[in-house]
Amino acid sequence: MTNHLNELSALELAGSIRDGRVTSRSVVESCIERITSTDGTLRAWQWLDPDHALDQADRLDRSRKFGKPLGALHGVPVGIKDIIDVGSVPTRHGSPLFAGRKARRNAFVVDRLSDAGAVILGKTVTTELAFMNPAETTNPHDATKSPGGSSSGSAASVAHCQAPLAVGSQTNGSVIRPASFCGVFGFKPTRGVISTDGVLETCPNLDQLGVFGRTLEDVAALADAISGHDSRDRKSWPGPRPRMRDGCRQEVPVEPDFAWFEPAYFDRLSEDSRQGFEDVVELLGGQVDRIAVPDGFDSLVETHRIIMDYEFNRGLGPRICRNPELVSAEVLGVVERAASITEADYRRALAMKSSAEHYFELFFRDYDAIIAPSAPGEAPARESGTGDPVFCTVWTLCGLPAVTLPVLTGNADLPIGLQLIAGREEDDRLLRTARWLIDELGRKLAG
């Protein structure tokens, strides 16, 4: 049981630690050994202190030994994207602008992980300021390919069995896209389920957190662990949260109904990806409705860009303009582009966002989920960037829960994710539908 513990799922590890079959120390040691032997190529970790991680594990092992309360993720290591504050630990947001910065306190989600008994393994690499400029991380399936961004290190570390779980963020496609490229499960809950307190604020109306794991139930359990109301975060709404793991384990009461439509940006979809989705839709038959693209849908990509550029510039622009030599041409381009956006443009974009949110609130009365690509196709070459996020843009704009399932493979034998999107606060229903779809596709392909 002690060999290759790093390859086990998070919930397998939590159960084994709880039952005394393994220790948290042995799990953390296995992950550290994997990182030490592979991260020279993968480069997924921005900050790692093995002694600090092992001290946490030893404390959690003592708690179990003496019969103290155990959390849902007791002793399980988790990677934290390097835009999320961990007290007294460097958090540089992937940029020399924040070189030497150490957080004064934990982000809300880090405290929630402590409540769940998790071990903070280290800080995973993010792209510059959680934007589009590629980081040093490579794709775990092919080092010449991109792992996606901006949660590059979080996705790659989980895919390469360096950690069973990791936390990332999404302002456009930064959880779903890297999960697709790296071949793992990525889950972005409804905006407001998880607090962004203590996280780099790039776009207040769009920033959301998400999670990575190698099983659907693992991402559900991690999302449960870090969700909760936080009065310091204006996007965090009070009240009960969807129980994600319960949803993942439930049987569907009736076979779900899916929607499929093809916006203008579908011309960016690769041929092998398009064929894979056509095969899925055909396998599901009458359970998928091919529907016309809603009026105004294609304009929502531009709506997202206006809000994102305007808020990024409002929050980080002054610091960037004081130190332009410390940022990339891509980031400077955003600041320059945002200068032409007026307050009236921004207010109109926010109104469009609200209108789209209302539309989807009504839409999901008829459908369990939308089926969509997670990305244009397989991971692109590293030198070409982190990939196009457009297949996530509208769902992020509207704050809808989304999950990517690693169920397809492209012509180069690299993973392609299938994305499911559901209605706001229906995260448990989304994961229940995702579980059904995985099982149904497996059954039909085997048959």
Image: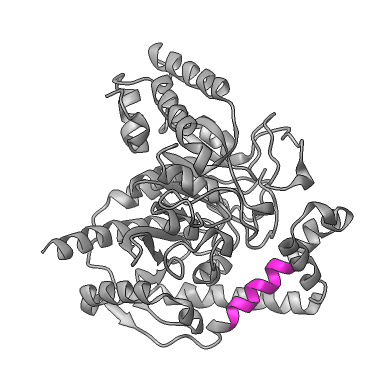
Query: Residue 370: image x %, image y %?
Result: 39, 71
Q: In the picture shown, does residue 416 fall above or below 159?
A: below
The relative height of residue 230 versus residue 105 in the rendered view (above or below) is: below
Give the residue at x 74% y 58%: 328
- Residue 438: tell me if it is visible: yes
- Residue 266 lies, in percent from the top left, at 46, 80
Q: Quadrant of the C terminus?
A: bottom left
* Camera-side residue of 446 and 117: 446
At x 30% / y 25%, what residue is drawn?
3
The location of residue 121, given as percent across then percent down, is: 52, 31
Quarter of the image for residue 205 reads: bottom right
Magenta span has 308?
Answer: yes
Q: Nearer the viewer, residue 242 or 220?
A: 220
Q: Is 21 located above or below residue 82 in the figure?
A: above
Q: Is residue 214 magenta?
A: no
Residue 341 coordinates in the image, percent (x, y): 79, 76
The residue range painted magenta reads 299-310
Outermost top residue: 66
In-front residue for pair 52/314:
52
Tell me the chief SS of the magenta region: helix
- Asked whether residue 366 appears in the rendered view, the answer is no
Q: Quadrant of the N terminus?
A: top left
Q: Looking at the image, which residue is at 67% across and 43% down?
A: 198
